[in-house]
Amino acid sequence: MSPTPAPPRRSFLKKSPDVRRQELIDATFRCLCRIGVSDTSVRTIAAEAGLSLGMVRHHFNSKDELLAATYRYMSDRLQTQSQEALEAADDTPMAQLLAFIYAGLQPPLLDHDYVRIRFLFWELTHTNASVREVHDEIYERFSAQLIGLVKAVAKANGSQADCALITRTITAFLKGIWAEWTLSSDGFDPRKLVDQMIPLLQHSLVGTTALRKAAR
């Protein structure tokens, strides 16, 4: 009787470090969606990715590092989609601002798991230093880009509006839309809520020069 052949050994060396890291980030995201933060561990992430614990620790030193990398990746996806929206829009200041506002409210990022896990990470900023560091980094980047677009509209209209306040208002409004959408069961289009805000936004960014012209 011939000996039973040994099962083929799984190779962990064929994929690049970037690919392995992305596999672990994707596995972390799936674990968070399925079992939440408390039950997600390096071991559960390794099992989800089909990798050994040693392979996980070769790329990430801890669960916190995996959480931080996953949060950064999710935000990079939003940044990429926003940049694509800006490039596709007209180059007028208001068109650019609206493209940026609408960017995160459409597929593929308009996804219940994506939005739900974004809220989970926002909650973690209060208790997890690694996640907080990433949050501060990406929030600063987002705010800087948004206020730049708001200031461009104000300048084009000769407006002396409080651009910092308008930027924070838009940010809060977008978070509220995400919350309403992910908690709703009727599948409404969140962009319709933005449509309601646009006239107020435009009015806030119309300067005195534009108002005098409109009154003539």
Image: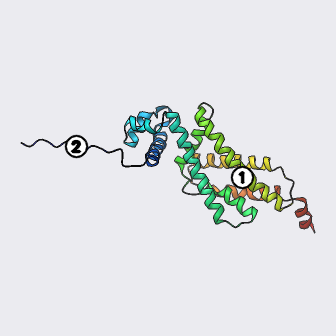
In depth, the one of 130 and 28 nearer the eye is 130
Mark 2 closeness class: few <14, some 14–19, many ≥20 residues within 10 Å: few
Between marks 2 and 1, how big is the CA–CA gap? 55 Å
Instruction: Kindly identify the residue that appears in the image at 49 percent across and 34 percent down.
Output: 63
Amino acid under label 1?
Leu
- Mark 2 or mark 1, which has the lower sequence index? 2
Q: Are marks 2 and 1 in contact (CB under 8 Å)?
A: no
**Residue ID for mark 2:** 7
Q: Nearer the viewer, residue 8 or 25?
A: 8
Residue 55: x and y in percent read 40, 38
Res. 149 in view? yes
User: So how many labels did they put on this image?
Assistant: 2
Of the residues shown, which amino acid type is indicated by label 2?
Pro
Q: Is residue 216 above or below residue 43?
A: below
Q: Residues within 10 Å of mark 1 (few under 14, many from 20)?
A: many
- Name the residue tied to disc 1: 146
Q: Position of residue 32 (x, y in %)?
A: 49, 39
Identity of the residue drawn at 67% across and 65% down: 89
Which residue is rendered at x = 74% and y = 46% of the image? 168
The quadrant of the rendering that contains the C terminus is bottom right
